[in-house]
Image (cartoon, rainbow, N blue to C red):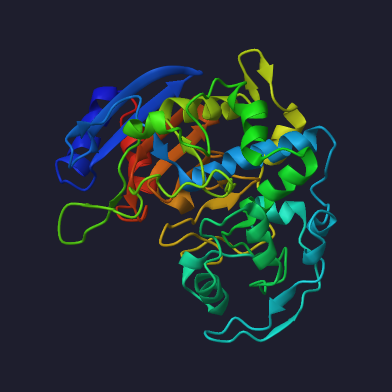
C-alpha cells in the first residue's frame, strides 16, 4: 500500500481545496499500525494544529460500541434477540403506528407487532430521527426535541413511549434512536450506567482510556472544534457544538451518539472487531455470537436506497445491508465504490468514519469534525483513495 500517495490524495482533495479544517487518519493491517497521518488544524481560529492526541465527538460511531456491548449480554444468556422490549419498558407494549406515511398526517392505528431487541439492533423498530425531515413523525420528533440530549435516558424513553411509530416493527429499515433505547435496557439489566458498563466491559479491556461520555475538564484543550459546511467557501466554526462544556450531559449517556474518542482508541475497538471479539488476551464474546452480529439481518427488506427508509440522508447505500450495529458491504458492484465484500463500517454525523475489511485484514479510521457528514461524500471518497493506493 502506498501510504504517501494516500496522504497526497487526501491533502489535495480535502485540504488544499479547504473543504476540511483538520483530520487524523490511521490504518492498521494484521492488527498493527501501518500508517498514521494528521492534517490541518484542531482549531483553525486559534491556530492549534491537529495532533495525534486530539479528541473527537464521534456521534453515531457510538452505536457499534453500544451494540457490541449489548451482544456481550446476549452472549452471557441474559437476554435474547427475540425478546420484546416491553419486558424492560412496559409502556412500549402497546404502541401506535402511523396509519399512512403522508406529509402532515398523524392518524395512527394500534401496532400489530411488538418491538424486539433485534429490531433495535438492526433499526427496524419504527423509531426515527428528527433530522430525516421526510414525514410527519420526523416532524413530531423535531417539535418535541426527541433525539436531542435529554436530562436522562429515562426522559427520552418516556416521550418515545407516547410517540407513534413510523411503521410496523420489523417491516422496514429506518435509522433511528433505537440504540439509545438499547442503552436504557443495558442499564436495566446491569444496574449500571451505560458509561460504567462500557468502561468495565470494553474500554478497560481494550485500553481505550480516551473514550467516554464524560469529557474531563482537563481534556478540554484536546477536543477538536466542530465546523459547518459552507457552500460559498471554507467551513465555518460551529459555535453551538464548541460551547463549553460541548453540550455534554454526563447524566444522559446517549447510546446513539454521546461518546468522545480518539482515532487510536477507536482502532483498538475496530481491531477487536476484525478479530471477531478478541483483543490481545481478552476474548469479549464467543465466535458464534460475533457471527450472528456481523451477518446481515435485513435481507428480507427492500434494497437500501437514497431515502429515509432504506438509507441515511444522501449517502448512497446501494450494495449495503445492516447487521447488528454495523453496515455490511454485501455487493461492491452495486455500491459503485472500491471496497471489499463483508466490510463492517459506520459513520458519525460530525464526519468520523471507520471500516473493518476482513478480506485485507485491515481497519481504517478517519476523524474530522464537519457537519453535515454528507457534505463531500466522504463515505465513498475515502475508500476510493485508500483502495486505489494498493500496490
Residue 136 screen position, x and y as percent? 55, 79
329, 220: nearer the viewer = 220
Classify 153 as above or below 20.
below
* 173 left or right, relative to 249: right
Residue 37 screen position, x and y as percent? 29, 25
* 164 left or right, relative to 258: right
224, 15: nearer the viewer = 224
Residue 269 screen position, x and y as percent? 55, 28
The residue positioned 64% from the left and 46% from the top of the image is 323
The residue positioned 50% from the left and 31% from the top of the image is 211
- Is residue 205 visible in the rendered image? The answer is yes
Q: Quadrant of residue 7?
A: top left
Number of dots carrying numbers: 0
Q: Quadrant of the C terminus?
A: top left
Residue 351 screen position, x and y as percent? 37, 46
* 158 left or right, relative to 229: right
The residue positioned 67% from the left and 40% from the top of the image is 193
- Is residue 297 visible in the rendered image? The answer is no
Amino acid at each position: 500500500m502506498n501510504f504517501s500517495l494516500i496522504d497526497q490524495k487526501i491533502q489535495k482533495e480535502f485540504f488544499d481545496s479547504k473543504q476540511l479544517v483538520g483530520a487524523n487518519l490511521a490504518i492498521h493491517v494484521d492488527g498493527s499500525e501501518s500508517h498514521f497521518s494528521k492534517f490541518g488544524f484542531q482549531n483553525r481560529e486559534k491556530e492549534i494544529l491537529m495532533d495525534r492526541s486530539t479528541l473527537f465527538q464521534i456521534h453515531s460511531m457510538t452505536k457499534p460500541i453500544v451494540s457490541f456491548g449489548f451482544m456481550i449480554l446476549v452472549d452471557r444468556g441474559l437476554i435474547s434477540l427475540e425478546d420484546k422490549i416491553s419486558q424492560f419498558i412496559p409502556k412500549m407494549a402497546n404502541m401506535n403506528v402511523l396509519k399512512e406515511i403522508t406529509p402532515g398526517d398523524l392518524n395512527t392505528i394500534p401496532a400489530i407487532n411488538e418491538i424486539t431487541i433485534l429490531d433495535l439492533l438492526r433499526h427496524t423498530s419504527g423509531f426515527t430521527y428528527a433530522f430525516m425531515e421526510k414525514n410527519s413523525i420526523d416532524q413530531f420528533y423535531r417539535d418535541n426535541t426527541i433525539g436531542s440530549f435529554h436530562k436522562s435516558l429515562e426522559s427520552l424513553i418516556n416521550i418515545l413511549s407516547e410517540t407513534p411509530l413510523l411503521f410496523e416493527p420489523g417491516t422496514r429499515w429506518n435509522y433511528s434512536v433505537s440504540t439509545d433505547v438499547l442503552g436504557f435496557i443495558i442499564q436495566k439489566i446491569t444496574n449500571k450506567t451505560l458509561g460504567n458498563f462500557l468502561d468495565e466491559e470494553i474500554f478497560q479491556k481494550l485500553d481505550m482510556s480516551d473514550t467516554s461520555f464524560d469529557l474531563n475538564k482537563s481534556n478540554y484543550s484536546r477536543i477538536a472544534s466542530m465546523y459547518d459546511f459552507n457552500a460559498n467557501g471554507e467551513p465555518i466554526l460551529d459555535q453551538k457544538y464548541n460551547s463549553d462544556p460541548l453540550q455534554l450531559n454526563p447524566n444522559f449517556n446517549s447510546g446513539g451518539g454521546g461518546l468522545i474518542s480518539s482515532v487510536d482508541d477507536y482502532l483498538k475497538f475496530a481491531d477487536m472487531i476484525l478479530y471477531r471479539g478478541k483483543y490481545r488476551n481478552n476474548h469479549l464474546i464467543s465466535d458464534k455470537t460475533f457471527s450472528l452480529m456481523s451477518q446481515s439481518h435485513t435481507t428480507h427488506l427492500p434494497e437500501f436506497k437514497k431515502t429515509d427508509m432504506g438509507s441515511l440522508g444522501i449517502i448512497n447505500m446501494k450494495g449495503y445491508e445492516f447487521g447488528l450495529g454495523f453496515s455490511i458491504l454485501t455487493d461492491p458492484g452495486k455500491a459503485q465504490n472500491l471496497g471489499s465484500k463483508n466490510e463492517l463500517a459506520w459513520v458519525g454525523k460530525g464526519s468520523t468514519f471507520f471500516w473493518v475489511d476482513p478480506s485485507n485484514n485491515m481497519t481504517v479510521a478517519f476523524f474530522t469534525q464537519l457537519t453535515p457528514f454528507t457534505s463531500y461524500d466522504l463515505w465513498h471518497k475515502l475508500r476510493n483513495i485508500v483502495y486505489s493506493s494498493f500496490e
